[in-house]
Image (cartoon, rainbow, N blue to C red):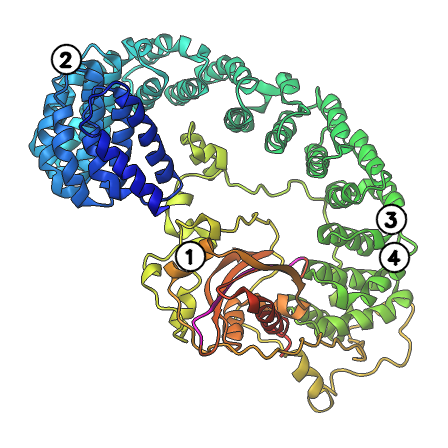
Amino acid sequence: MKGEVSDVKSQLRQLAGSRAPGTDDSKRDLFKKVLSYMTVGIDVSSVFSDMVMCSATSDIVLKKMCYLYVGNYAKYNPDLALLTINFLQRDCKDEDPMIRGLALRSLCTLRVPNLVEYLVGPLGSGLKDKSGYVRMVASIGVVKLYHISASTCVDADFPAMLKHLMLHDQDAQVVANCLFSLQEIWTLEANTSEEASSEREALLSKPVIYYFLNRIKDFNEWAQCIILEMVSKYVPPDSNEIFDIMNLLEDRLQHANGAIVLATIKLFLQLTLDMTDVHQQVYERIKAPLLTQVSLGSPEQSFAVLSHLHLLVMRAPMLFSTAYKHFYCHYNEPFYVKKLKLEMLTAVANESNTYEIVTELCEYAANVDIPMARESIRAVGKIALQQYDVNAIVDRLLQFLEMEKDHVTAETLVLVKDLLRKYPQWSHDCIAVVGNISSKNIQEPKAKAALIWMLGEYAQDMQDAPYVLESLVEKWEDECSAEVRLHLLTSVMKCFFRRPPETQQVLRAVLAAGIADFHQDVHDRALFYYRLLQHNVSVAEGVVNPPKQAVSVFADTQSSEIKDRIFDEFNSLSVVYKKPSYMFTDKEYRGPFAFSEEFGNMSIGVESEETAASSQRVEASDKELLLNTSEKEDKVLSNNGPAYSAPAYDGYLDTAASQVQSDLVSLEPPLPSHPPKTSSGIDLLSLGLSIKPTPAPTAPTLKLNAKPVLDPNTFQQKWRQLQVSVSQEISISPQGVAALANLQSLLRHMQGHSIQCIASGGQSPNYKFFFFAQKSEESSLFLVECIINSLTCKAQLKIKADDESSSQAFSTVFQSALSSYGTS
């Protein structure tokens, strides 16, 4: 490749001073070749001077390609940038306004602090140029100069020149660029200059606002959006002025560009926020333009408009209830659009349209697209929880259970559980159908937990409830989900209070398994139940199975304050992400991937608590290293505080004879046929059930450096360069998953096996780690991406290595270390 670059260099040098016919065509071919090399990452900086010499031409295409090349290399090579100043300044005085503008734009793009003095003259001339294109480029160039050297920009009086152009120039694009530049400059300067602060406020004065509103049709779409955003910050003194502004912008609602429509709607909503009647009329007026925008453009544009429409529907559902058919899903729409439309249908459902909406949703439930079918069933359940046509909806949900599709059955079980909590009068019909479902066919944790809840809550109505619970307890060791194990404990207790003779043995087994469980929450609940039963059975029944009232309203996942904040940020990404902007900008809301500013200077390999804590931050700019984890309403794993330290399983068994013998007595005599209603407790537990940890695989012979050192930047660079040599999924013991409640313990455990963690993050049920290790007495490195799912007890591994021949051996070492976590 160096030879090819050298050939190009020699050919450019030959053509530099040539005026022969066809020279420009030859230069074009060579310029294209240079740009293609540059695009694929080949260093062609050696031809810099030759490219500059060949740019001495009137061919505007050659000029453009040369400016593109110069702008790419000049910012990385300030010395080379100095070579371009003369020819760029010369081109700034060219007779062709297009060349003048392109040269000025390229000159401002260099952004080299040492060359600031060369920008002032061309920019000043550009702002006074007779060509509108040159003035347009110059007005944006002032902002670029400001970001390089703010003092130079202010001292040259460029803001005042921009203001004059903004108010007097006839070219609409020049005016728009001046407005944009002044807003940015005065916003940044307002923190240190009172004059800039007053100038920024002057932009929101009535004369300036009406000046832009009267000319708004002259501007392009981008400029109109900027003007509408500025007007939305203006506070009219009376209602007459509000109506004047709205009348001026009425036709903007019919614009084909969705951004202009949304910006206008935001302005109308803000202007009428304190005028209730007019505000409702605005909702009616904007409904048709929004629905039109939904059906136009790309799916991405439809999603953005739908997100804003959803926000409005949540605030005024009755106004959109008659337009529910606009939210029916089309077969060719992507899933993210369909999901949002389902949320819209749920929001607009009322007594008059529930039947039609639920009928449509039931059609989606049979869809071959499994995520779509799941969301449809959830939508039906949400409508039922809103008390619209409950009878018909419950019948349809029960029909879903007869479809014999695993994902449909799973989602329906979760919804039936919620419906029974709100409508207990439907228990007879629901339990009659649920009782025919085999627990063996339910694999999803939430669905299994819902089924177990119904087995315990309605044990007296389900003939096989104790025996189904017993079969589930027998598979306790194979159950990875702590949520299921917690529900199983509670349901067995409820079943015992209703049918004690049949549940006696399974209660003993589940309490033994629960107390021996390595998950802290499961262990604590089992121990709590056991001690409750020992203390007083009546009290235990009152705690575990008290009289319940029907749930009237399920908690909303978002507070009204957050919803109002999102509404205030209408026409922004906050609406699309359904989160206000401060959740992205404030450090305390950044979540598990809040990035440490000193991460780049961190020294990895020092075995200290400070380093271990700092290593849990990950580089924000490296998007490849990020893991998108969905937010869960119910956390599976929780980190208990130090208020109570439960005994560990091993210690519990070792000291059973001496320490717990007086508390835990073998259950030999049978219990009475019904729970005793006396004040005394009963002895329930015979610890015959033991959970043996899965033995870890034997560690292979590959030796690793006990204290490898690798800085984060090098890790990221190597991660991008190296290919994946091993990719596989492995199982983790439930004990190891339970121990993830304290991530630091995993990091220390892996350090004990000479494997260091450089970054970690995520939240239940997905945790992501980046590890590295080094061969003993060699510089060869191993890099690992490990994603652990606490619900499935699985870990996804990707291993990259300098020496791929030893990747498999290292994979065995890593699996051995990870498998032993939590078992020792």
Dot 3, how many residues are within 10 Å of its Cα: few (below 14), some (14-19), or many (20+)? some
Where is residue 315 shown, x and y percent of the image?
A: 52, 27
The boundaries of the magenta stretch are 778-791
SS category of the residue bearing label 3: loop
Q: Which residue is mark 2?
A: 130
Q: Residue at x 20, y 14 (%)?
A: 132
Which of the image's four quarters has the C terminus? bottom right
Question: What is the C-alpha distance between the residues marked 4 and 2?
Answer: 88 Å
> Distance between the Cα atoms at labels 2 and 3?
81 Å
Foreground disc of the pair 1, 4: 1
Q: Could you tell me how far apart the alpha carbons at marks 2 and 1 are, in whole angstroms?
A: 50 Å
**What's under tag 4, amino acid-wise?**
Ala
Secondary structure, mark 1, is helix
Q: CA distance from mark 1 to mark 3?
A: 50 Å
Q: Count residues near mark 4 (Cα–Cα under 10 Å), then give few for <14, some for 14-19, many for 20+.
A: many
Residue behind mark 4: 465
Estimate the x, y position of residue 758 in percent, counting from the top left: 44, 64
Q: Earlier in the sequence, mark 2 or mark 3?
A: 2
For mark 1, does the 10 Å Cα neighbourhood hold few (<14), some (14 to 19), or many (20 or more) residues? some
Instruction: Estimate the spatial distance between the alpha carbons at disc 1 and disc 4, rounded to whole Å.
Output: 54 Å
| Marked residue nearer the N-terminal end (2 or 1) | 2
